[in-house]
Image (cartoon, rainbow, N blue to C red):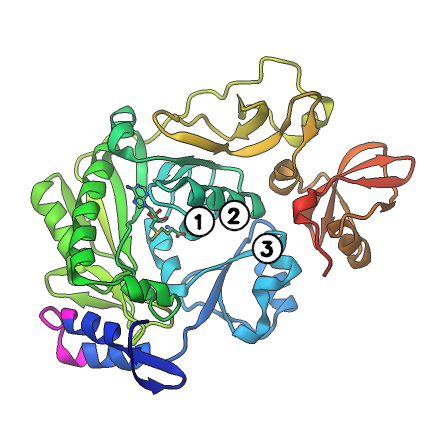
Amino acid sequence: MRVKGFSFRGNPVTITDMEMLDSLRPYYEEEEILLLEEALKKPSTHALYLNHHLISDEDFQALYPGLRAHPFIPHAYYFEQEDALGKSLLHNIGGFYILDAASMVSPYFLSPKKGERILDIAAAPGGKTSILSLMLEDGVLLSNDLSYKRALELSGNVERLGLSNVVVTSGDFEAAHPQYEEYFDAIMLDAPCSGSAMFRKDARLEQDWSKEKVLKNHEVQLRLLHLASTMLRPGGRILYSTCSFSYEEDEGSVLGFLKEHEDFEAVPLMDHPCFYHHKDLPEGIHLFPSHYEGEGQFLCLLRKKGEKEGTIFEKGRAFAGKLDPILKDFDLEGKDIRLHNDALYALPHPMRVSGLSLLRYGVKLGETSPRFLPDIALARALGKGHDIPLIKEKALAYLAGETFPLDGGDGFRVVSYLGIPLGFVKLTKGVAKNHYPKGLRRRY
Ligand code: SAM
C-alpha cells in the first residue's frame, strides 16, 4: 500500500488503487469504475470449497449451520471471518480448501469430464487444482508451477486434501512442451498477472503494481497461451483466467492470442446477473467485486477447433517387486505404480512426466528403504473403507501424537474421525503406536 488517501470502513483507498482504476478508464464505462472503486473500500469476503469426497454437504452443514451456499457452484460456501475455519481441525485434516469465491469459477467452467487428462500450468498454491481434482472422475491431472517453492506448497495441499489423481511438477513448458504435443484434453491457465483483483486481500500486490508490469505480464500470458495451445488436442479446451482487472491482461491477452491462432475460438458460457462482459469479447467473464461476492477474476473458455479422440489411457505399470501385504488392502489393482526417490507412488492412470521436476506422482504409498513404511498420503487418499473410527477424544490424542489403547487386529491400520482418514497407527495387542508425522502433530 503506497500512500494513504482517504479511508472507508477501515480500508484505505491508496494512490495505487487510484492509478490502477485510472488505467481502466480507457476500456470500461465510468459507472463501472466508480462501482469498483466503492467495492474496493469494503471488506473482503471469505469462502471455501468442501472436500465432498471426504465429508458430505449435509454433514458439513450440520457442523457449521451458519454458512451460506454459493449461488451456483456446488460444494462452495461463504463464511464469516469469526468462524476461524482456517484454524479448525476439519481444515487441517483436509475437509475443505479456503479460497476466494471468485477463484472457484474458472475450474467450475473448465468442467472436467470423466476420463480426461488435464493440465494446470500455473497451479500453486493449489486452489483451482483442488477443485479440478475433486470434480474429475477417473482421470488424471498434471499440476505444475514454475516456482519450486510454491510447487512444494501445492504438493502439501494436494496431500492435505488426500487428492489421489494429481501429479505435481515444477518447471517451465518453454522447454518441455514438445513432449506434450496434443497430449491434454483440457488445460487450466490461471496466468501469472499483476494481481490488481487481489489488492483487498494482499497489500503487497498493490505495492508492486505498475502499468509497465501489466504490459510485461501481457507478454508472458501470450507466451503461456501459445504453449498451452500446442499441448491441447483438437476439440480440447483452455480455461484462461487472471486475477487482474486490467484489460491488457484480460481481453487484451485473449484477443491477441485469437488473432494469431485461428484454430481457436472463444466459447460462450452460462450467464449470471453478477457477471460483467466487455463488448470486445462478450464470451469473457469479469467478476468485479461490485457485482460478485468475492475478489475479482477474469475468465474465458477457449476451444481448439476440429476433433481428435479424447485420451485413451495406457495400462498402469504394476510394481515389479513384491508389494508389502498392507498395500493389498488398498485397491491398488490396475493403478500406475512408480518408484521415485526411494518411495512408491500410485496414480489411477499413467501420466507422461518429461522435462519437468517431479514432486509427487499421485498418492505417496510409502518409503521403501530400509523397509516399507506406509505414508500418511496413503491413509488420506485411499483409507476410506479401511479405517477404524475414533471418538473425538481419541482423534485429538492421535493428532497430538499420543499412543493409546485401541481395539483391532495387529498391524498397520488407518484411523479416522467423522469418516475422514487421519493417518496410520501400528496396532500391537490393543495398543495403537502413533505414526502421525511429527511435523503435523498439534493439540487442539
Ligand atoms: N492457480 C493457482 C491457484 O489456484 O492456487 C494460482 C496461480 S497464481 C495466479 C500464478 C502462478 O504462476 C504463480 O504460482 C507463479 O509461480 C506461476 N508462474 C509464473 N510464471 C510461470 C510459468 N512460466 N510457468 C508456470 N507457472 C508460472
Q: Are marks 2 and 1 in contact (CB under 8 Å)?
A: yes
Write down the region rendered in magenta. 23-32
Residue 309 coordinates in the image, percent (x, y)? 28, 29
For the residues labelled 2 and 1, the Cα–Cα distance comes to 7 Å
For the residues labelled 1 and 3, the Cα–Cα distance comes to 15 Å
Q: Mark 1 vs mark 3: which is more N-terminal?
A: 3
Q: Mark 2 vs mark 3: give the one in front.
A: 2
Q: Is residue 139 left or right of residue 156?
A: left
The amino acid type, in three-letter code, at marker 1 is Gly
The answer to which image quadrant residue 364 occupies is top right
For the residues labelled 2 and 3, the Cα–Cα distance comes to 11 Å
Q: Mark 1 vs mark 3: give the one in front.
A: 1
Q: What residue do we see at 12% from left, 73% from top? A: 25
Q: What residue do we see at 29% from left, 68% from top? A: 272
SS at mark 2?
helix
Residue ID for mark 2: 157
In the displayed structure, 77 sits above or below 161; it is below
Using a 10 Å C-alpha cutoff, classify the residue at mark 2 as few (fewer than 14 neighbours), some (14 to 19) or many (20 or more): many
Residue ID for mark 3: 95
SS at mark 3?
loop
- Does the numbered disc 1 mark a residue whose Cβ is under 8 Å from ligand 1? yes
Residue 76 in view (yes/no) = no
Residue ID for mark 1: 126
User: As drawn, which residue projects farthest toward the front?
Assistant: 3
